[in-house]
Image: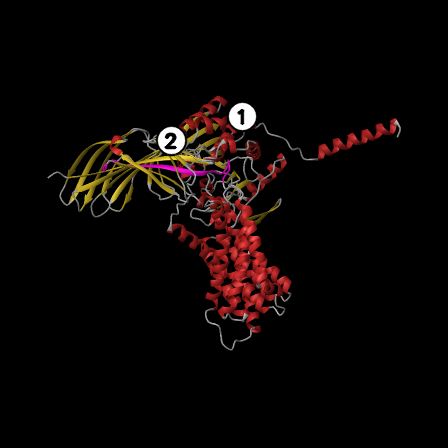
Amino acid sequence: MNRRSFRSLLKIYGSCCVFFCLVSPVRAQTPFSQDSALVYLRVLAEDIGPRPMGSPAEREAMNYALAKFREFGLDEAFIMPIRETVSSMTGAGVNTNSGIAVGVLRGATRRIIVIGGHIDSANPDIPGANDDGSGSAVVIEMARVLKQRSNESTIVFALFGGEEHGLRGSRHFVKHFDRMDSVVLMLQIDMANGSDWLLPLVDAENGSTPEWLARAAYEELDNLGHSGLSFPTHFYTMLEAAPGGGIGSDHQPFLEKNIPAIDFTSDVTDPIHTPQDNLQNFIPSGLKRSGDLVYRLAERFDGGVPDEPIGRYFLIQAGSILLFIPPLALSLFVVIAVGAGAYSLIIMRKQRQLENIPSKIPGLKMFLLMLIIQTCVWLSENLVGLIAGTRFPWLSEPEGYRVLGFLGGVAGIWASLQLAPKLNLTRVAYRYALRSMVFLVVFLILFSLLSLKLAVYPASAILLLGIAFTLRNPYFRLLAWLVSGYFMFRLIFSEGFFLFARTMTEIPAEGAASFYLHIFYIFFFSVWSFPFLLAFAALYLDSHNRISWLRAFGKPAGGIATAVIVLGCVVYLSTIPAYSQRWKQKITVNQSLNLDEGRGIITVSSSDYLDGALVSVDGRDTSLVGRETLARLTSFDASQHQWVTVERTVEASGDSNISFDIRLHIRTLHRPYTLSVTFAGGTGTPTDVRTPFVWSPGPNSITFRWYSFPDTAVFLPVSFTVTGSDSVKEYIEASFIEQPIPVSISKELTTVVSRTNVSRVTEYGRKE
């Protein structure tokens, strides 16, 4: 090639490069700085640390955010205080000192876009780096970068307190913010870890994020060159059926007020709500991904938003394709599915063969086989735990236990095949098919009462089994049967299954309680799986060409081969450590002080075995051995530890109805983590209650609660009337994170938390 030809080729190549640069989408970065956000996160998660609702640390974090808002030059920066709220679990009144840190960046119009995160963490032992120090850091950095551009909309940056206790901050905001009528859009960042998934939260009780906003999120993330935005349909469908609707985050109260809102949450299977939610287990790249996305959305809708405030759809993501299925289409699908199931039963009924001697209770006999199968599935994990010496061997590496569960089910099928011939089961396929459909229709009805989206799952099973019962090709029938159970089991074993599984490990289960819990799980999954066992029996008996491989599998050789494979899997999984730097065993040191009896007790507890823990109590060492989850260490004289002292004045008057006027001064040695005061007496709930604090009624009582870390001096003035008694009992209970007796615990891959519970009871009444 000569020099002239080479130059010509270079010109052509250069022209092509210019052309493709012009026509290809530009994946522009935003001014959002990951490094700056990481600095803010380090202050929140390490310098300040755990920030439970109402704590001084939560208030310090809010003040830090306000200082940054003012440093960046925002027009307003203030805290919206929250003095009282309700418990997310019981609905009881709670006194607190929480709030919302608010920064306002005025735009050319009064139209408002809210950008939010929650600044609290779950409890005093959780740094909350990911959940949601990361989201708060993104919000603070967004204030800096959006201040640098001219905005049409006014931008309000809100860092909500109390999200972990039922969205307390955001619910307070939408109720009390004086410019709520101008809010047109809400963008929430709840966890911004750099893990693989970034989940858009779109659901609330009254509807979902509008379609235009959900699509915009996917488009902008793709244009930015980031990846990971994934909608876990099955996980959200199950959560939406829960009371309150949707998975809780601070976008939800905005949707409930018909304001377009969306939340972005990183992988929920990260170690959130554990002491391992720290910077060591945090991937900073997620800050940039979430920050870039929210910046682009704020920029895109700065000039206004479409009119549709709320969407109603069933969202399915298939790769990069988003399917927004309207409720009418879901209803039509359910009707078609039921029709297909009914048609298949009619066909099978016409073709059925009558029995000379009908089998009795075939459904119960089959359910016995189902119990055997599910017992093998469920207890296969316990076999690993027995060898490894742990209750939860799957905690750090759970994926292999899906395989083990499948193999356990295969072993259960082999055992069922040995028993089945002895049960005199019916040979009429229609009887099994009918029972299978009846079970699924019952599921359908129950699920429909909770959610139309939820009803799609049993409807899918009905449709596919109807197809399986109608087809004649044995291979297609088997394929339809296999797929029929996918959606029902995908609902349980959803994208967030291990989030729930790990949460369940925190439930105490001692002795008989553990046994009954296992029985419940086996029974639950047996009921869930039963329609598909019945359907398989129907297909097996309706097949002219018997499934010869199943008969071969039922022979002793099949059982031996299955046992060898199961045991091999069990041995392999038992070599994988149950705990890691991301997932550690939690041991709690409990010290209980009864100040009336002058008695104190020290115990240690864990959801897993305490075996191997070295405990030092006031300088004396003890090594715990054995498979116990609770150990009583020692008792001590509580009178030497007057952590709660009380002064009171009481005035009581009246005859049959006694009116009490009480002035209570409670002083504590340390800030209590929680504090409650209960007045109990009479034949009913006290009436005419007058007090500046929020309280909750109970059986013959009223209760005052403080959360978390109120001052060391609490003054409680209260008056009330009691019927049927001339005295009341005063119960004071306080919990602390400090220890009266020094206790330390050493065990590999373990975190230790401390709780000290102090109680005292006083009775007083009208003086004669």
Q: In the displayed structure, would residue 424 be above or below residue 731?
A: below
Q: Answer with the quarter of the image where residue 300 lies.
A: top right
Is residue 581 rendered magenta in the image?
yes
Res. 149 mark: none
Q: Is residue 466 left or right of residue 510?
A: right
Q: Is residue 654 left or right of residue 365?
A: left
Disc 2 crowd rating (10 Å Cα; few below 14, some 14-19, many 20+) is: many
- Which residue reaches farthest right? 2
Q: Position of residue 593 (x, y in %)?
A: 28, 36
Disc 1 crowd rating (10 Å Cα; few below 14, some 14-19, many 20+) is: some
Q: Residue at x 38, y 43 (%)?
A: 89
Is residue 3 rendered magenta in the image?
no
Q: Which residue is mark 1?
A: 36
Which quadrant is home to the C terminus? top left
Q: Position of residue 732 (x, y in %)?
A: 26, 37
Q: Position of residue 435 (x, y in %)?
A: 50, 66
Q: Nearer the viewer, residue 295 or 122?
A: 122
- Which residue reaches farthest bottom? 356
- The amino acid pointed to by label 1 is Ser
Q: Nearer the viewer, residue 224 or 737?
A: 737
Q: Residue at x 52, y 62 (%)?
A: 416
Q: Which residue is mark 2?
A: 55
Q: Position of residue 246 (x, y in %)?
A: 47, 45
Q: Is residue 685 left or right of residue 397?
A: left
User: Magenta region: which residues?
Assistant: 579-597
